[in-house]
Image (cartoon, rainbow, N blue to C red):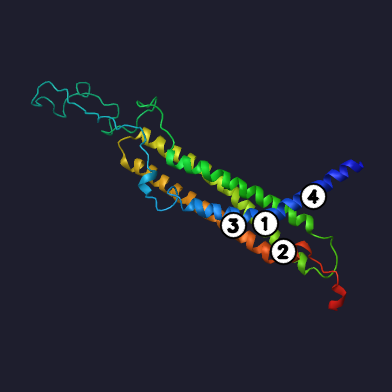
């Protein structure tokens, strides 16, 4: 390994440590204030659930009327004893309802995504991504400060390991928020397809609204959780900053 390569690796470690310390000292408090201000905006605060509803652009078709084509207008000659060939045949002899509509094309065009929620998601996704990146940076910072394995005087090392485990949990939780957003679109698409196939059933339309309300609440909760995670990480690191930087005291022999 060349001397230049070793120097580049050391420079990377030094820059990462410096960046992580600045993030803890200045970045996390600024992020906490920024998220508090965002939660106080009309998009997240005191918003009625009805404000996140959106028209599906799927009209209710006219009902299909099954007419009786008997010989007389008064219904004479329509007894059930007539041969089956003389009676009008239905596409479904066992039921008098249409089981579903074959959706070839929607008359009013495509069904759009929920625009109010898409606007919220556009704001929330960069916040989640930043938390993942900050957690990863903090994780590497602590990993670089863990000393070599030795017997005794490992209390500070245990603090480093506990803090590292907390940061890894935050990183995993933040990554899961992305999966939650993708699952919302998939679930909504399935319910909307039900509305397109069964446009006369209002319960499916109501299910879309309920799903949108649930996602709005989830997005609000995600922002709250991201703020809380920044607060908890900042608190645990600041309280244990001495042990995180110097897990082993230089005068350990004087303790015995």
Q: Position of residue 243 (x, y in %)?
A: 75, 66
Q: Earlier in the sequence, mark 1 or mark 3?
A: 1
Quadrant, the N terminus: top right
Judge left or right: residue 40 versus residue 127. Answer: left
Residue 255 is situated, as x and y percent measured from the top left of the image, at 84, 77
- In three-dimensional space, the C-alpha distance between marks 2 and 4, rounded to whole angstroms, equals 18 Å
Q: Nearer the viewer, residue 117 or 67?
A: 117
Q: Counting other residues with Cα less than 10 Å from the Cα at mark 2, is it few (<14), some (14-19), or many (20 or more)?
A: some
- Contact (CB < 8 A) between labels 2 and 4? no
Residue of label 1: 24
Task: Of the two numbered discs 2 and 4 on the same chain, state the one appearing first in sequence.
Answer: 4
Which residue appears at 76% of the width and 67% of the height?
Answer: 156
Task: Name the quadrant of the C terminus.
Answer: bottom right
The mark closer to the camera, 1 or 3, is: 1
Q: Measured along the vertical axis of the image, is residue 65 above or below residue 30?
A: above
Nearer-N-terminus badge (2/1): 1
Relative depth, front residue between 99 and 63: 63
The residue mark sitting in front, 4 or 3, is 4
Q: Is residue 167 above or below residue 74?
A: below
Which residue shows up at 50% across the image and 43% down it? 121
Mark whose residue sits in front, 4 or 1: 1
User: Between disc 4 and disc 1, whose residue precedes?
Assistant: 4
Mark sitting earlier along the chain (4/3): 4
From the image, tell me which residue sits under label 3.
229
Q: Using the rendered image of the protein, determine whether residue 138 is visible from the camera's viewpoint.
A: no
Q: CA distance from mark 3 to mark 2?
A: 17 Å
């Amino acid at each position: 390994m060349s001397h230049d390569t070793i120097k580049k690796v050391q420079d990377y470690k030094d820059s990462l440590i410096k960046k992580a310390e600045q993030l803890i000292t200045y970045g996390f408090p600024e992020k906490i204030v920024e998220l508090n201000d965002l939660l106080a905006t009309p998009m997240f605060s005191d918003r009625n659930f009805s404000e996140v509803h959106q028209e599906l652009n799927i009209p209710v078709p006219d009902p299909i009327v099954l007419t009786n084509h008997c010989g007389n207008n008064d219904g004479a000659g329509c007894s059930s004893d007539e041969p089956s060939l003389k009676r009008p045949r239905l596409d479904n002899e066992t039921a008098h309802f249409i089981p579903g509509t074959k959706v070839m094309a929607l008359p009013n065009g495509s069904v759009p995504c929920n625009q109010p929620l898409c606007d919220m998601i556009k704001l929330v996704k960069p916040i989640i991504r930043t938390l993942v990146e900050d957690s990863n940076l903090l994780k590497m910072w602590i990993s670089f400060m863990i000393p070599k394995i030795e017997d005794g005087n490992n209390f500070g090392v245990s603090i480093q390991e506990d803090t590292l485990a907390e940061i890894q949990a935050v990183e995993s939780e933040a990554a899961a928020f992305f999966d939650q957003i993708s699952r919302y679109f998939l679930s909504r698409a399935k319910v909307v397809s039900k509305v397109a196939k069964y446009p006369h059933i209002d319960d499916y339309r109501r299910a879309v609204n309920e799903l949108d309300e649930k996602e709005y609440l989830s997005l609000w909760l995600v922002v709250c959780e991201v703020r809380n995670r920044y607060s908890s990480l900042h608190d645990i690191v600041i309280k244990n900053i001495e042990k995180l930087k110097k897990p082993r005291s230089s005068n350990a022999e004087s303790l015995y």
